[in-house]
Image (tube, helix red, strand yellow):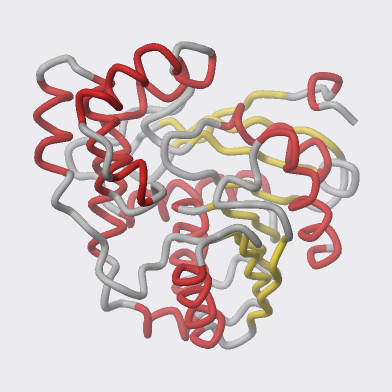
Amino acid sequence: MNHTTQITRTRTVTSADGTPISYQTLGAGPGLIVLGGSLRTSQDYLPLASVLARSFTVHVVDRRGRGASGPQGPEYDLGKEVEDLLAVQEETGARLAFGHSYGGLVILETARSSQVFERIAVYEPGIPVAPLPTHWMAPYRERLAAGDPYGAFVHFIRGSGGAPAFVAKMPHWYLRAAMRVGFRGPSWQRMRPLLEANLAEHGQLAAQHGRLGAFTAVTAPVLLLVGGRTPPASRAEFDVVRDTLPHATLESVPGLGHFGPEGKKAGLVAERALRFLR
């Protein structure tokens, strides 16, 4: 089913610090919360949600700092994200959760301290096993302050560790020029306002290094999904995450990379999640 044919209802809940958190609801059945990654809004996960909605009432959250939700705020940290998720969970009664990347980290951090979820599926959650590079953050912040979002984004893709090696070696000026030509569509228009939030979120990701053992407190069964095209070094780190979580199963989804839960192939991820969550 194409996500454009789904009827979605937008609702808002108030988090513990008064921040409004917006979420889109579609489908029918047991409640399932979907939480996305950095530089993404709920719109990016509607193709995934439309498949999940065949079996569940799906609540796709706009995390703070995006969509109709309130700003991150000056005291932003991972704990604020946990409060937001708990507010949505209490409002919806959902006992199932799916998280991608940073959203996966938020769900597992929530499950670590609160037994609100019966089953959890995460796709490449942002739990760092090795230290994350942070050298890109200062020039990224400087470019944002100078009103140069393309320049900031180039620092991110070259420095954060996710780009192919040949891209990371390209000159900054060349990549910036290429971005200005190639990144103009709806995807960039959704991403551009999220660049500030992206910096804060990656700061929180970097701060999680050394906390891996804390996730032994997650008692819910977890399906850990990894893209078959994800680099071997990253896949090895997810093996470590699987071995840390007490009740985790790891599955590889062939042909997908880190952004598997988005776009045209999102259904492949949704089908794996459905089999586990039903």
Point out the image quarter for the C terminus.
bottom right
Going 66% across and 76% down the picture, which residue do you hit?
Answer: 250
Q: Nearer the viewer, residue 228 or 192?
A: 228
Going 72% across and 24% down the picture, which residue do you hit?
Answer: 9
Going 61% across and 61% down the picture, which residue do you hit?
Answer: 122
Residue 129, given in percent of the width and then of the height, sits at: 36, 75
Q: Nearer the viewer, residue 122 or 182?
A: 182
Residue 241, given in percent of the width and then of the height, sits at: 49, 78
Residue 249, given in percent of the width and then of the height, sits at: 68, 79
Point out the image quarter for the N terminus.
top right
Residue 155, given in percent of the width and then of the height, sits at: 22, 37
- Above or below, 161 against 226 in this view is above
**Left-right relation of 78 to 183:** left
Question: Quadrant location of residue 196?
Answer: top left
Q: Nearer the viewer, residue 111 or 197?
A: 197
**Left-right relation of 123 to 133:** right
Question: Quadrant location of residue 105?
Answer: bottom left
**Left-right relation of 128 to 122:** left
- Above or below, 111 against 21 in this view is below
Going 42% across and 25% down the picture, which residue do you hit?
Answer: 191
Total number of numbered labels? 0
- Above or below, 24 against 138 in this view is above
- Above or below, 179 against 204 in this view is above
